[in-house]
Image (cartoon, helix red, strand yellow):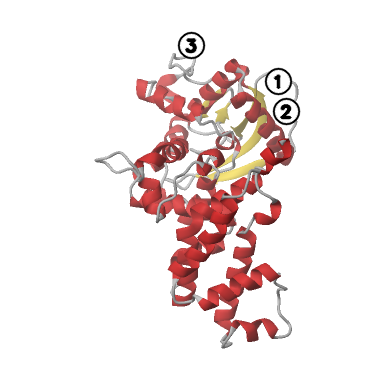
Amino acid sequence: MTIKIPSLVSDHIYTLEYEVRDLRKIRYSHSYFGEPFEGYPLAILQPRGATLARHFYLSKIYAYFDAWQFLAEFRQLSLGTPIVIQDYVTVGNGRCAILSHAYHEDGWQAQTYREMLAERAHELGLDVGDYEQPILVRRVLSEVDLVLFVNEANMRLNQSYSKDEWAAVDAHFISGDLLLMLEVKESPEKTFMAQANSRFVSAWLGKLPESERVAILDARTHSVDLAGVARLERALLARVYGSAWLTMLTYDSYDNDIRSVTNALRWSIIKVAQVEELVKQGRRPPDAAIAQDVLAAVELWVMFKKSGVKSVQIFLSQENMFTDPTETQTTILAMFERNRRSGTRIKMQLDGYCDHVLALPDENQRILC
């Protein structure tokens, strides 16, 4: 499978092709511990060298290993699957070093990568083969100026992804287990900035590209700033509701009644995310999940507001409706109408439901008993 990726700093468009290779047969710059590999043209392809800070950065990524970072298709040269020209890694040397270390340790990181690689390769129409250390790479098909390519590939512009696009990416970087350990405060801001929840925030930050991470850290305290809090909110909205439409609506709607609902979704997102994660892990019954019903109710609420009809009851009774809401969705929609002027009251209703589900006994433990 071939893809075309434009440079972010010039008018070049590069054509790349996905391949599965043996990691031991390609050449990358440094080992996981920072030793340069003989024969790799460091001055041309990796002028930054290896520092203690680099090893610390790699070790954090390894500790919170997320195979998706190594396999995803980004619309940027600098992110995602490593890029090779001939047998040399030109982009993703650090990712190759981490993966090599994972294979050497042969722990859960290597197992996770192998499993996800098999799925990704199938999607791309590739065969993993019998490689002992398989790796997915992107090979540059056209002739390029090596120095120019490396410099362009390692440069990026913050405007390249919209906030909603980054939300979909960031959602994959959230650890479900750490999410369940969050001590939920009265607002997402206070939750994410609480010292008790620093492990969750640090784990998420550690998975972001370095330039993205620096942009949302307070220069004085080195903790996540308000922009980072907003970004985490967006990531959770994308993780729970999976709708770019909703994340855009949540921040960009000017209708007061719609904003009451979307503000409530923002303020309650952590508890809703915890409920969805428990259901996903099989620790709560499937019918305890609420996200899809909430999403459907929001869609109905927006349709109702645009319809000009005076009440939800009349709106739902009209013929030729495009949707057939369930009883739960109708109940949530009615709750939106009753509390249309108060996002706080809507949040209290959602929180109340989530608190009930969170207090239920663990389904897995009950089965074991």
The disc label shown at residue 38, or none: 3
Q: Closer to us: mark 1 or mark 3? A: 1
SS under mark 1: loop
Q: Is residue 16 above or below residue 261?
A: above
Depth order, front residue of 310/151: 310
Secondary structure at badge 3 equals: loop
> Which of the pair 166/124 is nearer the observer?
166
Q: Position of residue 138 (x, y in %)?
A: 60, 34
| Amino acid at circle 3 | Glu
Q: Real-space Cα distance between discs 2 and 3?
A: 28 Å
Quadrant where the image shows the C terminus: top right
Task: Identify which residue, 43 or 53, lies in the foreground.
Answer: 53
Q: Residue at x 41, y 53 (%)?
A: 188
367 left or right of 83 in image:
right
Separation (CA) of disc 1 from disc 2:
7 Å
Image height check: is 277 above or below 121?
Answer: below
Which residue occupies the extreme front position in the image?
369
Graded by Cα atoms within 10 Å as few (under 14), some (14 to 19) or many (20 or more), the crowding at tag 2 reads many
Q: Residues within 10 Å of mark 3 (few under 14, many from 20)?
A: few
Placement of 355 over or under 311, stated as above or below: above
Q: Is residue 206 left or right of residue 286?
A: left
> For this view, does 19 lie left or right of residue 7?
right
Q: Residue at x 69, y 50 (%)?
A: 285
- The mark nearer the N terminus, 2 or 3, is 3
What residue would you read off at disc 1? 131
Asked if the residue at tag 3 contacts the one at tag 2, i.e. Cβ–Cβ closer than 8 Å, the answer is: no
State if disc 3 and disc 1 touch (CB < 8 Å): no
Nearest the viewer among 306 and 83 is: 306
Disc 2 marks which amino acid? Answer: Val
Whether residue 47 appears in this view of the structure is no
Give the residue type that dot 1 points to. Tyr
Q: Which residue is mark 2?
A: 128
